[in-house]
Image: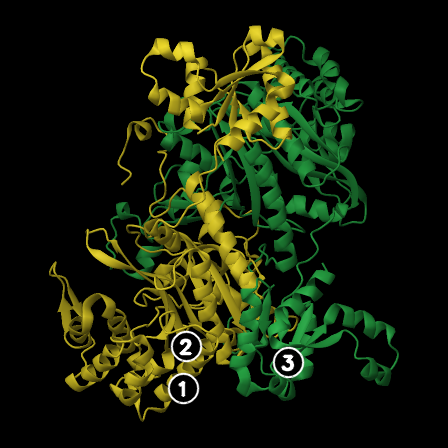
Chain colours: A green, B yellow
Amino acid sequence: MAKPTKDAAAGRPEARLPKGFRDIEAAEIRQSQDMLAKIRAVYERYGFEPLETPAFEYTDALGKFLPDSDRPNEGVFSLLDEDDSERGLPSGANASERGLPSGADASERGLPSGASKNWLSLRYDLTAPLARYVAQNVQSLPKPFRRYATGSVFRNEKPGPGRYRQFTQFDADTVGAESVAADAEMTMLAADTLEALGIARGDYVIKMNNRKVLDGVLELAGVDPASPSETHRRLTVLRAMDKFDKFGIEGVALLLGKGRKDESGDFTAGAGLAAGAIEKITSFLAASSGDRAGALDRVTPIIRGNARAEEGMAELAAITSLVRGTGYEAKRIAFDPSVVRGLDYYTGPVFEAELLFEVKNEDGQTVRFGSVGGGGRYDDLVARFTGERVPATGFSIGVSRLQAALNALGVKKESPAAGPVVVLVMDKTELAQYQQLTQRLRAAGIRAEMYLGSSGMKAQMKYADKRSSPVAVIQGSDERAKGEVTLKDLVEGAKAAAAIKNNKEWKEARPAQLSVPEDKMVDAVREILNRHL
Amino acid sequence: MAKPTKDAAAGRPEARLPKGFRDIEAAEIRQSQDMLAKIRAVYERYGFEPLETPAFEYTDALGKFLPDSDRPNEGVFSLLDEDDSERGLPSGANASERGLPSGADASERGLPSGASKNWLSLRYDLTAPLARYVAQNVQSLPKPFRRYATGSVFRNEKPGPGRYRQFTQFDADTVGAESVAADAEMTMLAADTLEALGIARGDYVIKMNNRKVLDGVLELAGVDPASPSETHRRLTVLRAMDKFDKFGIEGVALLLGKGRKDESGDFTAGAGLAAGAIEKITSFLAASSGDRAGALDRVTPIIRGNARAEEGMAELAAITSLVRGTGYEAKRIAFDPSVVRGLDYYTGPVFEAELLFEVKNEDGQTVRFGSVGGGGRYDDLVARFTGERVPATGFSIGVSRLQAALNALGVKKESPAAGPVVVLVMDKTELAQYQQLTQRLRAAGIRAEMYLGSSGMKAQMKYADKRSSPVAVIQGSDERAKGEVTLKDLVEGAKAAAAIKNNKEWKEARPAQLSVPEDKMVDAVREILNRHL
């Protein structure tokens, strides 16, 4: 990374992307705009209203809910708000003081720890800002409040293949609804959205579980989910359960017990549970194998007698009954005991949208595509601010991940927008004339541009080619004298060029080329464009 | 700001927006989506391709070009990239070390000064990231490279009324085009975009000037624009000229001389120029008064003999000739000597899109709406990285500012999207039935939702009202037994309620309400919706 280059040696900055960030180019943008429009249409149809919150929140308002609990603050991008009048620094204070005061105590100078009004963080999801918004505007909002939101979120994590530090989410949330019908609706929304994007029924499943059930199973295994001293162990257990898809029963059993060594020899410490406790958890997970419709029944005897788990199972049964009653079968929406979900703020049902078709992973292995979104119920997130419980549930799509899935599936992409018609510049003293021709095409709604570089005819044709231009408009001095333009059909021309054998034949045939009077140019160009639609 | 509240006293974070940031709600989002789509359509028609760069850039790659040069680093949000492997900190290092090492030298601990690979900054515009992108990908790009981009940019400035620290820009740029035809195109693009948004011809003007002309005038006034020791004075002069609209000739003359005291008694130090120099500059500015078409002629004698200014004037004349030749008159695109533009990277023609109609400002005074966008030529920005000059020009729209303008103008907004059809929940044991009705409406493409709160009939009708719902679907046990639903036309109902005098009359008439068999529900709802389109 960033090794000294010729440029750096000359005292120039190096042109490079920050690690873990990326540029997105035209074809991908057009595709994702199409995706976002389709997702938006489904969310709107479900009655959600758009809301945008800013990229920044006060750090204490965001809270610490990121999965990797060993270093929760590292997951976010934070900075001290220099402009905060409460800091009491006059605007004329010198630069280093206004940055991070060297006299501040270590926790202030280092990473934000605990509530500090001066720290800003970039949002790591769209849910925590929603909770802040609702707490702030609770009086004026309809109850329930149903909103959708899309935008960039930021994670200050180690980047990896396909894993970026800025990415796009698309969320829908219902705030102020206690009813499991709100959760049921989230699962149907997820299914409808995937289908609207062209993912076939059978190629996806919306899996659900319930944090109450998971906590109950932990209790049955002797881990008290409510005890602060057990927090670390609880997370280790949940993380182990989350690895069921990857490592299977045996791998999870190792992670629940003494620990597990992977192929490379790296050792992951285990939760240190006893054999009986491990057996309880793995038998629960094992119920995820077999027909999806039967999973509820298979789990029922395992969690019997634990009130928390039974309450959670009753909720899942109610959701299941609602979605089945509305025609969503088990192959589309089903209970799956192995779903955990990383974020720490969930309190009830959790969901995961999984794509079932297979792709090759980086190591060349064939694997299921996996998760493209998820969500769940978070009844305590607004109460963090107000002290009053506001039940809420939501679903979030990982847009880039889903876009990768659509590409892997080969779901019909919009044909890449044809490039612009290029008006060549044959005579630099006649720029106004070429500009007029260009403007005439634009005024007729045709995508067009005059060549703006300084190269000759050949380079201009090459440029038109690189821009995927469908038509070149050419007017030399002879044609100008006659009030004509020559149109080259570049799509047809490319085909003809492939077929015609020699230069002489080419020159005689002059395929895909015609002369028209200037005032017929727009119609003639449109005719060629329509031919290639 | 942020004084301790009841919540804070209870150890809870306060639900508040960071200073200078804002939430954007549904109606404004729908309007701005419509605007963005219209702007995009014009930019596409001009042949530009979309590009997205990330929110972050390395600080040294962004450069320091923000207007307020007294504190250039304060204008950006910056943070040290903890994840940079070059820092050589092991991933297990403790938190304070990983934040900002206390042993680091002051410049590293304070604000980024000079090139440092470890500092990230949020982009303050879309041009600096474009220059980085072009420098990085110059080999593979079409030449010229024409791209548009839209997204949030961030300024770490003191917020004010209507002035936020995060806002949206929409830019088009042509990179690799020396020709003034590229600049001319930017001014036409700007004019076409404003008209596409509904701003009438005559309500706007695209004003242009040229940095070369400004530098020439400075030379004529005895300020050497190229001398580093004169940098501060040059900026003071340019800033004074930029105030011509606000303070007029007399005010500018004070700012060019000893300084100016405003109404509140605050004193702004002047550039300290001599009377002759001041006269040179003010006579140049004065040429902006009078008919727009004649401004070029009025300035010509003033700058005569200065090679730099004459070169700039020749470029402006060439642009003028191109746009006039394409039918854009002086009332749409014209030279204006008072245009300066704040950003420091401009090297040639600069543009400003100004709205001419009048609005009341915060103090109740009637003023012109003013600038909603601008741009110009920046031939050295790519060379910062590569050492090789890549001529470039662009135009940027301030989307929120333009949206405020459209609202002030009362440009016909899209009618606010009607709220969703609300299916009331009359019997909580029949949720699956209500969900089915809802899903049936959605499947037919009708925006609909089941009420998800826990309140009774009256609150549900109030909710439907708050959501601007056009229709409520009601099914009590009697209706369910008969396989019917009742539809309430809430738009018609509201009108009738206004007309009907008493409760008895209302109950007898039951206006805007009908019963239909369940399987006719979708058609009947659609009929009501069509009636209110």
Whether labels 2 and 3 belong to a single chain: the reply is no
Q: Position of residue B421 (x, y in %)?
A: 52, 26
Residue A318 lies in what quarter of the image? top right
Residue A14 visible in the current orientation: no
SS state under label 3: strand
| Outermost bottom residue | B305
Give the quadrant of the N terminus of chain B.
Answer: top left
Subunit ID for the residue under disc 1: B
Which labelled disc corresponds to residue A484? 3
Subunit ID for the residue under disc 2: B
Judged left or right of residue B350, residue A191 is right
Circle 2 packing at 10 Å, graded few (<14), some (14-19), many (20+), is many
Q: Position of residue B414 (x, y in %)?
A: 45, 44
SS state under label 2: strand
The CA distance from mark 2 to mark 1 is 11 Å
SS state under label 1: helix
Circle 1 packing at 10 Å, graded few (<14), some (14-19), many (20+), is some
Rendered residue at 35%/51% (across/down) = B404
What residue did someone put label 2 on? Answer: B349
Q: Position of residue A340 (x, y in %)?
A: 64, 29
What residue did someone put label 1 on? Answer: B314
